[in-house]
Amino acid sequence: MKKHFKGTSYHYAKLIIGFVIGSFLLASCNENPLEVNEPQWLGASIYDYLKTDGHYTNYIKLIDDLNYAEVLAKTGSKTLFVAKDSAFNEFFKKNDWGVNEYAQLSLAQKKMILNFGMINDAYLVEMLSNYNPGGGLVEGGGMRKTTAVSVLDSLQFENGLTLPESPYWNNYRFKGIYILKDNTPWTMMYFTQKQMDQSRITNEDFRILTGLSRNHNDAHLFGNKIIKRDITSKNGYLNVLQSVMTPPANMAQYVDGKANLSMFAKLLERFSAPYYDPTNTILYKQTHPLFTDTIFTKKYFSKFGGMVYYPTGGTISSDLLLPFDPGWNTYSSNANNPSGAPMEADMAAMFVPTNDAMNQFFNSGAGAVLKDRFGSWDNVPNTIIPLFLKRHMRSSLMQTLPSKFSAMVDDDNSALRVKTNDITNVFIGRNGIVYETNQVYPPDDYGSVYGPALLSANDVSPLNKTKIWNWAITQNEFRLYLNSMVSRYSFFVPTDDYFTKYIDPIAFAQDRAGALKFWYNTKTSSVCATVYSFDKKTGLMGDSIAVIKSVSQGDDASVFLKGRLLDMLNMHIVVGGVESGKEFYLTKGNVALKILGSGTDMTIQGGENMDLNDPVRVIKDYNQTNGHTYFIDKPIQAPLKSVFKILSTQPEFSAFFTLLNGFPGTTPTSPIIFVNKTNYYGIDFNVKLFNTFNYTVYVPTNDAINKAITDGIITPWDSQGNIVGINDMTDASVKTAAIAKLERFVRYHFQDNSVFLDGQSVNTTFQSATIKTDDLPSGFNTFKNKYYKIGVSGSGRDLTLTTENNQQAHVVTSGGLYNIMTRDLTFKDKPTSYNTIDKSATGIDFLKSAITTSSTAVIHQIDAVLNFQ
């Protein structure tokens, strides 16, 4: 039988080896159990083959020096990868160890060459990709196997000069430390045709990863070609490599050892620490009786493969954990994900920017925010570095092959835009692949409008801190929303120093009004608030009354603070830009903002800011990838006046208000226009027509209402002269019809979408709140059962309204009764049911109060009534 089993099945090969091992066992009666009669067709042992061939004298020296001759001559079931003497001659000319002849190899180096090329089982090359994950054979999917290397062979003593610059290593800074870079078995990685086909690794992937071209059925260990394979012996298989194979480093070691990657390495090393290794300490002392020191293992802070507690025992915050331990030799992606791959089937990958790329990023683009806040990479705090590292660490090489670059996304489903041209070098390590890149791939958190708030929340500088706002963002899960790169935002961020007054809407609705001052509690890492009395007339805060402290995620105080800050967040985000020249913009929460100027010359006013004549000013602005972030000197305050409040207190609106307020409704507790009941509780009365949106209310002048009454267009509630009012009608059917007609008339003055006079021209139609109930033709060709429309046009400083019956009305600008911002808030319960802000009265605990929703409307006075008929 030939020594080269081309095409032999895996099971048949295992049967052969099993037969040999069985024959060894049957020879137990011999004086030397290793001396047996093996079938002559199996050929020589691994050791005899190498010795007889004559081209492997260096390997024979390795075997003899390490006392491995008997093992490889007569026992075991091994797969060995060797190199010829000619390959050793080339190795001694140039290698990372600095040795130029065999005699210079240390004992540890000899062990590494021999044991790293040895698998403690017999495999044909094409069967290397088979593995058994603990239940059944998986064929063709494997790319790694553990070797015969003992982790203790890699034990080294490091002095303080080479230790990472982090406090966890300071105890060993001057005395040094015995350290294992990882205490899990070392693995070899291979490319075989079967494995590449099944894993869909293309030849181009292979070329980029190794720098080599390959032919069909070629096989490589790392980038080392197998030039002669499957030499069959009585105790296993022998394969010849093109070059001498020395163990590559793991990913962490490689990054830490490369001078041009030192900036990234320093960031990575911050999250490493030495951990006492009792098992290997005991094992080492058994073979080295004179050793009295302690052995440590270097681990990285990670939930998977690393450590989740500090060497002192304290738990590491989840925010400080890496996606995986980059020094973990037996890295397994199914430790990260139950549906992931076992150690044999996958590795990790890392994109590591060069120092030049790190510097370029830090001085331009999204990195400029980092530089602005911290000045240097060394000053960037640990709290935000994991976001950066996580973006560059990939849990699956199979999903990080060059052919997969265009489809890569991170854990937040954000595209990771790596191009093959970005790759300057590739290293294949024991546990993964390192792509050296000329680009940085920052997390969206850095480049998005959220970035400045995040970075300033973690800044050591006392200026422009944003801890309160960052807490609000994280508690309300706004991070991914603000990080969206398919949208563009204008994000207003009140800094901690200016977070001095928030007029609470529910407290405002009570007789004793209250306002809140938010502050960050460094002891609990949460936001608290101090409650102050508030004068509605002057807008001034009085004495402090109470303190609201957030204790845990679910307590009333935390829910209260989270909810109020959520309401604020929604009114501090505008989708789109706010420097287009308009004056009014709607926020995410449908609150209108009046904005003048740009950059640090910008002023912002919500409705209450306008009422108090207290504009918000920008103190710093950042141009981010998905919009602008503006740091402001106080929170924006939304309107605290409802439509009911404005119409009921403004004399010029009294005639229209009388019409709206006169409806009896179907029941006394269910009026048609204004309502104050369950699901509608607000500061006073809410407009029943509104539904969590933004609207426009057109209010005819008192003269226009009176003219419409005189002209018979509408019927008043109370009789006027010879005009019989609805309340005085005696015929029930006539009265009902009159009420219905009046309701449809007033509803036509309520429009979906807020339209402002803000310097921008407009020419479009909007939907009213009146439904068309007939098939008669109308000005805008509205269909039956659809809402009548209102045509709105104007130059930006005037508005003309065109009705369905082709009549017109104009916004009155002479008296200043236009662009009036209102907000109808809806609360979980009526404000009077809660105790007062200082708990001096009985009732529901004020901390249980909540803002359910709100609708906003802009009010314009117009010179004529709107009529659709």
Image (cartoon, rainbow, N blue to C red):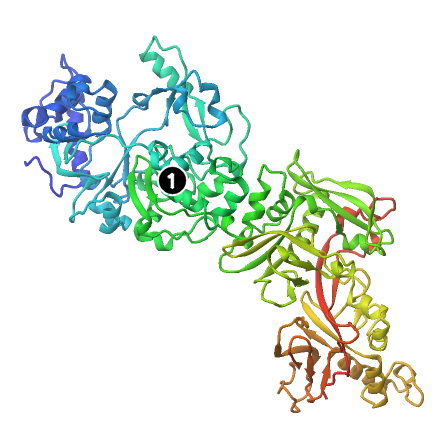
Image-based side of 277 in relation to 827, left or right: left
Q: Image height check: is 718 above or below 775?
A: above
Task: Out of 823 and 196, give the one closest to the viewer.
Answer: 823
Q: Image height check: is 234 above or below 11?
A: above
Q: Residue furthest top?
A: 290
Q: Residues within 10 Å of mark 1 (few under 14, many from 20)?
A: some
Q: How many marks?
A: 1
Image-based side of 397 in relation to 169, left or right: left
Looking at the image, which residue is at 53% across and 36% down? Answer: 381
Image-based side of 839 in relation to 81, left or right: right
User: Could you say whether the residue bearing mark 1 is in a helix, strand or loop?
Assistant: helix
Q: Image height check: is 695 above or below 640?
A: below
Tell me, yes or no, if residue 826 can be seen here: no
Q: Position of residue 186 (x, y in %)?
A: 30, 30
Residue 567 placement: quadrant: bottom right
Going by the numbered disc 1, the residue's amino acid type is: Asn
Q: Residue furthest front?
A: 601
Tell me, yes or no, if residue 828 can be seen here: yes
Residue 20 placement: quadrant: top left
Image-based side of 600 in relation to 347, left or right: right
Q: Position of residue 799 (x, y in %)?
A: 69, 78
Looking at the image, which residue is at 18% across and 30% down? Answer: 94
Q: Position of residue 715 (x, y in %)?
A: 85, 85
- In the picture of the structure, the residue carrying the numbered disc 1 is 355
From the image, which quarter does the N terminus lie in?
top left
From the image, which quarter does the C terminus lie in?
bottom right
Q: Position of residue 446 (x, y in %)?
A: 50, 48
